[in-house]
Amino acid sequence: MSSRPRSRVCNSRLKWLKWLLVGLIGVSAILPIRLAIGLHQAPLPQAIFVLGGDSDRMRFAAQFWHVHPNLAIWVSDLAAYETENRRIFQQLNVPDVRVKFDGRATDTVTNFTSLVNVFSVQKLQHLYLITSDAHMRRARAIATIVLGSRGIVITPVSVPSRYKPEAMGRVVRDCLRSLLWLVTGRSGAMLNPRLTRSHDRL
C-alpha cells in the first residue's frame, strides 16, 4: 500500500516538471519576439522602477529622477517601509505625485509579478530598472521572463554596494519561480526560505 502514495508524489512531480518544460520552451520562443517589439515601440524608458530592500536604492533613484524629471518612479517594497521610503524622496525633493508605491511584494519575484499587469495597463513598455549591483543579475533574469512576457523591456541601472554578486543558485531558483508564475499564475513564494522571517526586506 505504501507504493501508491509514492507513485502519486512521483506523478505530481513529473506533472510539474512537464509544465515547467513546456513553459521554458514557450518562453524561449516568444520572449525574444515580444522584447524586440517592445524595444521598437518604446526605444527610450518611460518610467523608473525601483526594487526595495535597501534605502540606498531609494536615494539613488531620487537623484536619478532629477536627471529624468519627466518620468514617474514606481517603488516595490514591503508595505512596512513605505513611510521611510516616502520620506527619502521628500527629503531629496521628489514631488509625491511623481512616486507610486506598491507594497504587495514579499521578495524579488513578486516585485515583478505584483506590478507587471499594472505596467501593461499603463502601457509602459520600457523601464529603467534600479537595484543594487549585487542584486542586478537575478533581477534582470526575472524581469526578462516576467516583464518580457508582456513585452516590457528594461534598461538596468545598478546602485553600487559592498556586496558580492548573488549566487547563481538563487538566480536559477527565481527563474524557475518566474516560469511557474507564467504557467500557473502562482509565484512559488513558498520556495523562498527568507519568507519565514517576515521582518526581512527583499
Image (cartoon, rainbow, N blue to C red):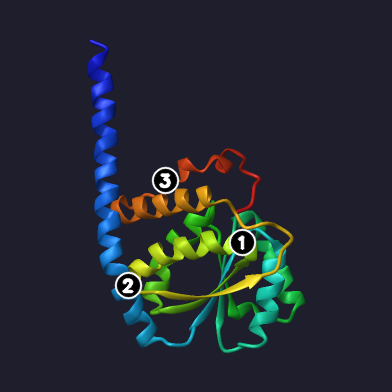
Q: Residue at x 52, y 80 (%)?
A: 47
Residue 104 in the image, given as x and y percentages of width and height: 51, 56
Q: Residues within 10 Å of mark 1 (few under 14, many from 20)?
A: many
Q: Residue at x 65, y 88 (%)?
A: 67
Label 1 residue SS: loop
Number of dots carrying numbers: 3
Residue located beneath label 2 in the image: 32
Residue 114 falls left or right of residue 78: left
N-terminal-most mark, 2 or 1: 2
Kind of residue indicated by mark 3: Gly
Q: Amino acid at mark 1?
A: Gly
Label 3, residues with CA under 10 Å away: few <14, some 14-19, many ≥20: some
Tell me what residue is drawn at x 64 percent, y 54 percent: 80
Q: Earlier in the sequence, mark 1 or mark 3?
A: 1
Q: Which residue is mark 1?
A: 52
The correct choice, above or below, for 134 with respect to 35 in the image is: above
Q: Secondary structure at mark 2?
A: helix
Rendered residue at 61%/87% (across/down): 68
Marks 2/1: CA–CA distance:
27 Å
Quarter of the image where the C terminus is located: bottom right
Quarter assignment of residue 92: bottom right
**Left or right placement of residue 92 versus residue 81 in this view:** right
